[in-house]
Image: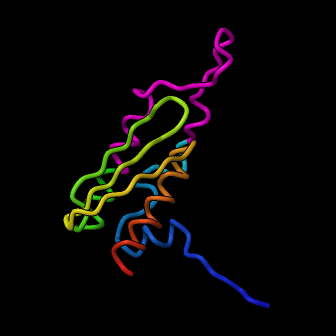
Amino acid sequence: MLHTYQDSNTAMLSCFGTSIHETDIRSFNSNALRVYNPVTGVRHRKASTTSEIRQKICSYFLDAFPDVRRIKIVDTGQKFSARVWFKSGRTFCEKAYSVSNLYGLLDERIRNVLYQ
């Protein structure tokens, strides 16, 4: 039987000297901030409620990975969109419904791009 092991985000953060408590990503629940609009029938959230955690994620990736030139995370109300620019000129985009999922996707993708 084949066993695969993945490092958790906690282990990845601790190996770079940043604790999970400094980023507050685990305790932040972006889905709890969504409200239901009965007129349109859509659940959404205001971008201002997630601005602090988005800023923390951006500063973490800029500090942890010196090859990342710029990162932008946008809260559209339903999804989070991120765009990452590298110093080499390469870019990529990711989307997710929660900020913790977006963080995991960005972490995995940046590591794959930089350490291939």
Relative vertical location of residue 26 with respect to residue 112 in this rendering, above or below: above
Residue 49, how many percent across, how many down? 44, 28
At 36% across and 79% down in the image, what residue appears?
115
Q: How many marks?
A: 0
Q: What is the magenta range?
A: 29-57
The image quadrant where one finds the N terminus is bottom right
> Residue at 50% across / 45% down in the picture?
99
Residue 65 vs 6, above or below: the answer is above
Identified at 69% across, 11% down, the residue is 38
Task: Indicate the colouring scheme.
Answer: rainbow
Q: Position of residue 53 (x, y in %)?
A: 41, 42
Q: Residue furthest bottom?
A: 1
Instruction: Give the x, y percent position of residue 76.
Output: 46, 31
Drawn side of residue 67 relative to residue 113, left or right: left
Q: Nearer the viewer, residue 17 or 45?
A: 45
- Is 20 placed left or right of 41 in the picture? left
Farthest residue to the top: give it. Answer: 39
Residue 106: x and y in percent read 44, 59
Above or below residue 5? Residue 81 is above
